[in-house]
Image: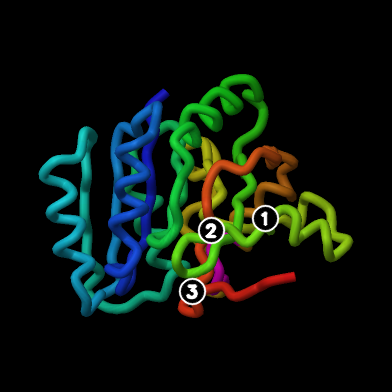
């Protein structure tokens, strides 16, 4: 089963290298990294190009001709992936070294599910853990696991992408579309283990905190 990482970038130079390094440090490496950039004006392009020269897996980088917004930027990244299992990635988080391996194993054990979500621990801008998790925040509001919707925690089978893409233009948040569709089809699986850090730095596209 081939694995891909779909990353959408926009002016992510400040934290991008840490996330890229966490890909290289995976106990099970991905087969490819696909990056689509939404017209960054910082050093994002240079960081990706430099990374691609030494990465132990394929790296493909695309730059949009115009700014599309993060939902449609992810739409393009996902559409260019060739893996049987596709991980969504933000540009400013840090993955734990066994994330791909653990999600991969879970996917093999549950063939009827198409979208998988792991939990993530929140950190401050410097990467210091805050003692909160994304799933924990959802539950602290009295909501059920089905309401846990965080794109960077998602891994998707190719069969689901065939249904989910293209992401409708009226959905300004890509993970909302993916989560609602998975719930409608009854194909979402929540993995309660924390497999990454989720950085909060004041410039996130989503600022929801419980």
Where does the magenta region start and end? 171-175
Q: Determine the CA span between mark 1 and mark 2.
A: 8 Å
Residue 3's spot in the image, x, y percent? 39, 33
Q: Quadrant of the C terminus?
A: bottom right
Check if mark 1's residue and mark 2's residue have beta carbons within 8 Å: no
- Identify the residue at horizontal 55%, vertical 23% (top origin): 105
Residue 121's spot in the image, x, y percent? 61, 53
The quadrant holding residue 86 is top left
Q: Determine the CA span between mark 3 and mark 2.
A: 10 Å
Q: Mark 1 points at which residue?
A: 133
Mark linked to residue 201: 3
- Front-most of residues 74 and 127: 127
Q: Mark 2 points at which residue?
A: 198
- Identify the residue at horizontal 60%, vertical 41% (top origin): 115
- Identify the residue at horizontal 20%, vertical 40% (top origin): 55
- Front-most of residues 126 and 67: 126
- Secondary structure under tag 3 reads loop
Residue 158's spot in the image, x, y percent? 47, 37
């Amino acid at each position: 089963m081939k694995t891909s990482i779909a990353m959408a970038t926009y002016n992510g130079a400040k934290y991008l290298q840490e996330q890229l390094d966490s890909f290289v440090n995976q106990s099970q490496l991905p087969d490819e990294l696909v990056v689509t950039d939404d017209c960054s004006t910082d050093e994002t392009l240079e960081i990706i190009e430099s990374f691609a020269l030494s990465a132990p897996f394929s790296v493909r980088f695309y730059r949009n001709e115009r700014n599309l917004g993060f939902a449609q930027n992810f739409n393009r990244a996902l559409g260019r992936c060739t893996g049987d299992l596709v991980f969504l990635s933000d540009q400013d988080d840090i993955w734990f070294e066994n994330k791909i391996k653990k999600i991969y194993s879970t996917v093999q054990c549950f063939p009827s599910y198409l979208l998988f979500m792991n939990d993530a621990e929140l950190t401050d801008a410097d990467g210091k853990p805050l003692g909160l998790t994304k799933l924990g925040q959802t539950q602290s509001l009295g909501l059920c696991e089905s309401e846990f919707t965080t794109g960077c925690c998602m891994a998707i089978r190719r069969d689901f992408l065939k249904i989910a893409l293209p992401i409708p233009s009226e959905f300004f948040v890509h993970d909302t579309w993916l989560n609602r569709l998975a719930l409608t089809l009854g194909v979402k699986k929540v993995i309660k283990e924390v497999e990454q850090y989720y950085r909060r730095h004041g410039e996130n596209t989503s600022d929801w905190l419980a």
